[in-house]
Amino acid sequence: MPKTTGWLNNAGAVLLKKGSYKVMIVSLIKNTFLWLLSATVLIVLSACGGGGGGSATSFSVSGTITPVSGSRVDSDVNNPDDAFAFNNDFNSAQLIPNPVSLGGYVSLSPTNAAGDRFANQSDLKDYFSVQLAAGQVISLTNVNIDMDLDLYLWDENQNLVESSLNVKGNNEGLTVPGAFTGTQNFFIEVRAALGSNGVSASIYVLTIGLASQSFQNSGYQLSSDFVPGEIIVSFNKSNTNKNLQAKAGDVGLTALAGASGRDMLMRIDTKAQVANVMKTLNMSEAVKSVDAIKQKKLDTLLALKSLYQRDDVKQVRLNYIYKSLATPNDTNYSVQWNLPLINLQQAWDVTTGSSNVIVAVIDTGVNLSHPDLAGKLVQGFDFIRDVTAAADGNGIDNNPDDPGDNIAGFSSSFHGTHVAGTVGAATNNGKGVAGVGWNTRIMPLRVLGVGGVGNSYDIEQAVRYAAGLANDSNTFPAQKADVINLSLGGSSPNTTGQLLPTPQAYIDARNAGVIVVAAAGNDSSSTPLYPASYDGVVSVGAVDLSKRLAPYSNFGIYIDVVAPGGDASRNINGDSYPDGILSTLASDSGSSVTSTYGIKQGTSMAAPHVAGVAALMKAVNSSMSPDDFDMALSSGGITEDLGITGFDSQFGFGLIDALKAVLIAQGGVIPDNPFLAVSPGSINFGSTGTVATLGIRNAGTGILNAINVSENSGGWLTVTENTVDADKLGTYTLTVNRDNLAEGTYIADITISSSVNTVTIPVILQKITIVTFDDAGTHYVLLYDPSKPPATAVVAQTRATLVNGLYQFNIDNITPGDYQFFAGTDLDNDGFICGTGEACGIYPDSSPDQATFTVDSSNITNVNFVTGFGINLTGSALSLDKPKLLPVIKKLTF
Amino acid sequence: MHRNKKNIPGLVLLLSALFIISSCQSGEQKDTETAITTLYQGLNCGGNNVTPGLKLLSSVADLKNELSIPLMLKKIKLIDFSKSAVLKINMGQKRSGGYGLKLNTQQASIQKNELTIKIDWREPAANSMVTQALTSPCLYLLIPSADFDVITLVDQSQNKRLQLTL
């Protein structure tokens, strides 16, 4: 680290700053004056020399660690330091409170590691007994993607009522079924199902009834709407020669429909087939339900799980029963707030788009190998003429793969991949994200090279190619695009104040029937950005989750429409992710490009929403022209009007509305189709929330009235009008009062009826007293000296003492210095605290401004901090470049 | 004035002591160079703050809090913070693509306690076509311990961009 220096003062003495010095006093000096001067030098030296003074003093530090409210630990974890009681059947079920955040451990086989509690036996199942209310969400977070854990819910009579059986590595979640009031007793079972890559144990976190959970039904629950017994299977290419009967025989199921080379429909029918499935899954005990339908569905889910293990199976899925309000089963759909915001679920009921409709994404190129774009891409082109800018070894070529626009090799933007995913990621494929256009296909065209920069000429050649017009590639696409998306732009040196004339390429594309959509820009300005501001191009601004103009979005008379672009500086919906737009992405932070997912914000993200909606319109009306689209837009027919009634300089003609858009494209005239929409769809006040806002609106067209709002809480919930119109549409304030409530969980319904439909919104809250019995497991407190190398940085350690739900600790003999405390549990006994799923906390606050605390001259007491469970999203990397992780710290061994 | 000849040796000794003391300090700084390496560079790692800035990170915990990308965690563990520090350069939030930071030369100069580092501070040319997504470029550099108390960043055109006084 940089050293400091001394300086000479006016008196001629050298005043030294703290530091180490070598000093020689050569001999005694007899003259008194000189003797005194020398003594002064000596005094100065001793005062300034050395880094910490002379004496070897030490001090103690003590404090209290508070686990997050509602913490519990599984009574049989692998760490022998933790209290122990088996909980592996109904009779020994561990009693837990509600709400709760519980850290647990299960294993398929003994660990064989000396010192482990489960060295010689497995810990296959954990049972918990708990009081639950109908509608509560139970989430199981599996922290090891090589383990498959399953979640079961049993009633107090040990009847199976619900289960969540995702395939390995995925989290589980279910909703407590029923319409009972108050709470009832249930058993929750966490079961180790399968392991791979040598892994046979996992830590998990079980949560009940906490606020703002992002879980959404993944489709692998008993309550999911699928045909009991039926499974759709497709096999890898090398295994498609066998006919349906033969393949059914291979996998031990009954053949129903399909043929080699395409999907096959099979069924699990007989006891022998069920036994075979259990054998494949190494299940020694069956899971039984007295309900025949539930049993059949359970057997189906287990059969699906067993097929997932086979090397010859390419894809396996349930035969879902589709009803209105199609909800895709993509893993991260629940994070895509932007899609319901523009009524896409209702639009998908009308159409899920067509693979005959193509949207050209003119951008940085696309990560062609991304698994969530598989089957969605048509042949594209690379129009970057300059070889240096192209950074792919040549100029114009037929390879639109994005090699990364950051030539240093770290963290390229892969902007085009993100845009493409928003338009048309593979949807309802059980993974990744959903695309606006669902079945719409993408034509990737690369025009932005190094640094994400391009030029007008290259872009216009790509526009011409997309429209099936003559261009510098001297080639034409097999099928021209229906829509072009340009999430790019530049300003103009034009000082005349007039709009620039539209370049011929855009005029010709329009004349060829292609709708051209572009991003309006992020300069928070009304200055026109091009190509968005060209006449004939649809200019798209951005809104955030609350339908407010995004803080960066351009505005002004050149804005035609707005769409979700996000605001990643906020997290309004409390789903643990910034409110940006989640889509497909790629990363070159490693040695090669890998496909991933990520969140971005900008009008770049807004434009593909409009392009995707235009594609849905084309799917139901292939003859719709750019003029038709413009007329529908300017009439207000395909948007939700925001801001001032009609066109305004903030939102243009409003927020694109996918349902209105496809209806008007389908029939030419939007029939009156009012319907009541309420948001949010549920409200959890948790244990401390007191106020919330409910929005009630007409999400269709025509007149919606006779609004009546009522609730059945019995007094603890109040609903009052906030800002409503003459039809009582608008916002309402919800207030809760816990004063007269006994400790427990309470649920009520808010019922909003209208002239068309009725919506019921469940409301949940908890009343808890001061917790005196939280127990998140044995807490180790480690004293960490960050100035030391990591291998020797832990300089002291102690076990905290649990007293009335608080962990108290004291460490003696601490020498002066700057330190941190790390505290946490070690449920799996691997010698590390703060592993994923284990409780963890740091003192001081982890902000770099307060990275350490100082021990120098006295004992320190009241070092108080908190621990919580660390959970990472499994199966995909959602990040703005750097997910926040807590450190994993090795305990001292004695 | 009475001269005490016996004082002359004492004066000599005292002056010698003073000379030795001053010599034991860091003393006059010589111009030197030191090797800088890039630890990480990204386009969206600077956060939401629009203000460019420098930050010196001097511990594993500091750096892990900033740079928790799994591929980087292994590198972080190899850093000896008794001999090095990490400088984070944040370009500030930008409204489009086309921006970036890169180390220009690995040799940084130290003159009069000022460490000068040359970087490529890339901005899109006016009116050029760029992506319309917000970015926040940043650059992490590994700096060996040396005698400096000011860090200055100079771009490829010799413009002084940022400065940090320690």
Image (spheres, coloured by chain):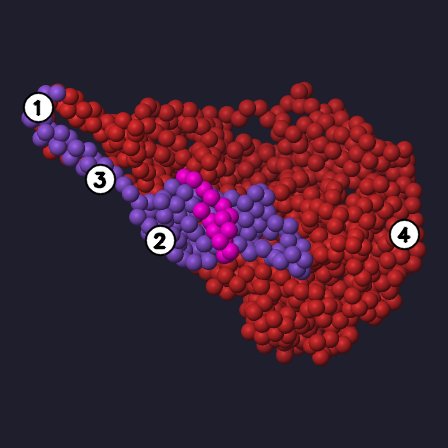
Q: In which quadrant will I find the N terminus of chain A?
A: top left
- Would you place residue A83 above or below residue A768 in this image? below
Task: List the residue tagged with mark 3.
Answer: B23
Q: Amino acid at mark 4?
A: Ser
State the image coordinates of residue B47 (x, y, percent, origin top left): 56, 45
Badge 2 amino acid: Thr
Q: Are marks 1 and 2 in contact (CB under 8 Å)?
A: no
Q: Position of residue B70 (x, y in %)?
A: 47, 53
Task: Inspect this view and state whether residue A585 appears.
Answer: no
Q: Measure how far apart labels 3 and 1 are at the Cα level.
A: 29 Å
**C-alpha gap between disc 1 and disc 2:** 52 Å
Q: What's the magenta bit mostly, secondary-structure-wise?
A: strand
Residue topped by disc 1? B4
**Residue A38 image-quadrant placement:** top left
Q: Nearer the viewer, mark 3 or mark 2?
A: 3
Which chain is rendered purple in the image?
A: B
Q: Visible in this render: residue A62?
A: yes
The residue tagged 4 is A635
The region drawn magenta spans B152-166
Ranked by sequence position, the earlier of labels 3 and 2 is 3
Q: Looking at this view, is A464 or A721 the one in front? A: A464
Colour that chain A carries in the picture: red
Q: Which residue is mark 2?
A: B34
Label 4 packing within 10 angstroms: few (<14), some (14-19), many (20+): few
Give the chain letter at badge 3.
Answer: B
Q: SS of the residue at dot 2?
A: strand
Image mark 4: chain: A
Q: Secondary structure at mark 1?
A: loop
